[in-house]
Amino acid sequence: MYGWIWRHLPGNAWVRALISLVLVLGIVYLLFQYVFPWAEPLLPFNDVTVDGAGGDTGTGAGSGSDAGSDPEEGIR
């Protein structure tokens, strides 16, 4: 496919490279301005499956000054 596009672009290699760069930048612009904003509500990025049933509040082992003490102490 890329070979077909390259063969059909006008000019020598430098002109073709410049036109190819402009085409790629145009496609990236269209994706970021129109396609990605349109598709973002359809994607499940905000569908979180983690709940708070574990009881871990971030005060367990590895946090605070008593990190070397009882690891079960922060979990209630």
Image (tube, rainbow, N blue to C red):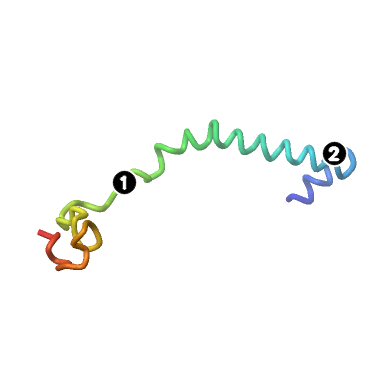
Task: State the SS at label 2.
Answer: helix
- Disc 1 marks a residue whose amino acid type is Asp
Toward the viewer: 46 or 55?
55
Toward the viewer: 42 or 70?
70
Q: Which residue, given by chain and number where applicable, does mark 1 sit on?
A: 47
- Name which residue lies at 21% across and 59% down: 65
Lower sequence index among marks 1 and 2: 2
Classify residue 4 as left or right of residue 11: left
| Quarter of the image where the C terminus is located | bottom left
Q: Of the numbered discs in the image, which one, if any, rests on residue 73?
A: none
Classify residue 32 as left or right of residue 43: right
Residue at the limit of the structure toward the front, as seen here: 65
Classify residue 52 as left or right of residue 22: left
Q: Of the numbered discs in the image, which one, if any, rests on residue 15?
A: 2
Toward the viewer: 4 or 74?
74
Q: CA distance from mark 1 to mark 2?
A: 46 Å
Label 2 Cα neighbours within 10 Å, binned few <14 / some 14-19 / many ≥20: few
Q: x and y percent of residue 51 in the render?
A: 21, 52
| Picture quadrant where residue 5 is located | top right
**Cβ atoms under marks 1 and 2 closer than 8 Å:** no
- Disc 2 marks a residue whose amino acid type is Val
Q: x and y percent of residue 34 in the render?
A: 54, 31
- Above or below, 30 against 4 in this view is above
- Above or below, 24 against 57 in this view is above
Label 1 Cα neighbours within 10 Å, binned few <14 / some 14-19 / many ≥20: few
Classify residue 10 as left or right of residue 62: right
Q: x and y percent of residue 50 in the render?
A: 25, 53
- Name which residue lies at 27% across and 52% down: 49
- Above or below, 41 against 4 in this view is above
| Picture quadrant where residue 73 is located | bottom left
